[in-house]
Amino acid sequence: MPARADFRPQKNTRFFLAPAADAAKLAAFPNYRFHLTSLNMSKPTTTPKTAAAKAVFKALDTFKIETPSWGYADTGTRFGKFFQDAAAIDLNDKLADAGQVHALTGCCPQVAVHVLWDFQPGQDPKEVAALAAGHGVRIGAINPNLFQDQIYKYGSFANTDPAVRKAALDHTLYSIDLGKKLGSQCVSMWLADGVNYPGQASVRARKKRMEECLTAAHKKLAPGQLLLIEYKPFEPAFYATDIADWGMSYLYAKKAGKQARVLVDTGHHYTAQNIEQIVAWLLDENMLGGFHFNDRRYADDDLTLGSIDPYQAFRIFHEIHHHTFDAGKPADIAYMIDQSHNDKSKIEATIQTVVTAQELYVKAALVDHKRLAALQDKNAQIDAEEILKTAFFTDVKPFIREWRLANGLPEDPLKAHRESGYERDAAKARKARRKELGIVQSGSYA
Ligand code: PSV
Ligand code: MN
């Protein structure tokens, strides 16, 4: 194995990626390539000393965030794509890249998958699980695809045609079954259903059909499996979306059954909407299933988290920590990333997002909840607000570096990634493979 900059194998080195012995198991994936990256995973040498450092260590010890398989592949807008040689070609590449992110950050053990984009028809889930394990990760949320096929022109679960609804339900049940076989907890439902013009459809009839299908899907969940229902006010339909806001998701989830929850994609709100208030309400109702994190300037821009408004993500995390303080235990929330980062390097953008998520989560953990409660009781609005601002402006980077070192992780994951040479190797190998496989990247919109 080539020694790479700071990552020479040392005692207690843990290899996150598959040893050669696993190659036979993975023979079904002809494009499989090993990318051996090793990290010194020696026992923690540093223990936090100050109260702030302790709070940071406590928060980071449990914080995990799932990266999306599609965030490693070429993506674009409806106007086209810009290609990157290092972008993942297939599921194996995506899992390898996710393994690299996890190896460097230590907090991304799971990868969300999109069934249609990632799974071959009839593919054995055991093989996929082994492939993920070989890269040091697990399969996380399963996303059925109910929007791409031609049959979904007028919707999936809300479609007037029973045959289309059946096809959509069958695909959802297949996704639920995949989740069971892969030991994954969440099935993430994003329904692109909606209509473009007033008068085109009965809003109430569409609602009823949606309810029926979601309830039928819920019936097939295994114990412990969760059905997450994501909302979005616009796109691809622009007059009325069938699950347009959190209230609609909430009602559908309540009707579907006890294992359904609301999924909040931070990009799926109108510009001025108070997302953290929605989060607080859902927490209070025990209906918050998880997040799709990204940032936005205008609409569902899918920019990297915290790039535009880090204070908003902080306020969301604050509501979560505040709820944990009041409830005495954390809520079970799936933190996931859903970004396109079209023109940034895929892995770098993902690492940047994960590091930002850790920083904002940790800043929010520094809020003095006891003091805040006392100030809130007295309506001391300025002092209460200052508690949040003080936490937000605290420089947490030194504590996070300490935590990383204590956990055998590189203190600067982005720098470590750049020095590892991973991306340069991936670009070379994937460019050659595209040529070999005759893959022509096409960026045309029409
Ligand atoms: C739709 O905009 C969405 O947020 C859904 O979660 C999809 O699964 C994802 O984006 C696809 O990128
Ligand atoms: Mn989403």
Image: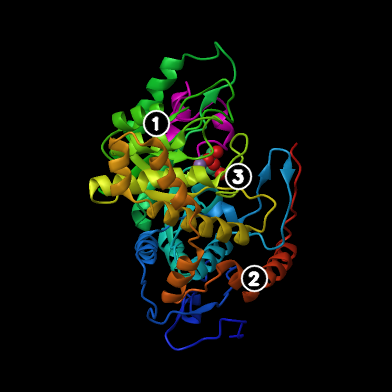
Q: Which residue is mark 2?
A: 418
Q: Residues within 10 Å of mark 3 (few under 14, many from 20)?
A: few
**Mark closer to the chain start, 3 or 2:** 3
Image quadrant where one finds the C terminus: top right
- Cα separation between marks 1 and 3: 26 Å
162 in relation to 132, above or below: above
The residue where tag 1 is placed is 249
Of residues 13 and 59, which is closer to you in this image? Answer: 59
Q: Residue at x 75, y 63 (%)?
A: 435
Q: Nearer the viewer, mark 2 or mark 1?
A: 2
Q: Which residues are magenta?
A: 145-169
Question: For residue 213: magenta?
Answer: no
Residue at the (53%, 56%) spot, across then down: 356
Tell whether position 160 is magenta: yes
Residue 231 lies, in percent from the top left, at 46, 33
Q: Is residue 262 above or below residue 118?
A: above
Answer with the quarter of the image where residue 308 lies.
top right
The alpha-carbon separation of the residues under discs 2 and 1 comes to: 41 Å
| Residue 308 badge | 3
Q: Nearer the viewer, mark 1 or mark 3?
A: 3
> Hey, what amino acid is under mark 2?
Arg
Q: Earlier in the sequence, mark 2 or mark 1?
A: 1
Q: Residue at x 75, y 48 (%)?
A: 442
Query: Could you say where residue 319 lies in the image, as x and y percent from the top left?
Result: 37, 43
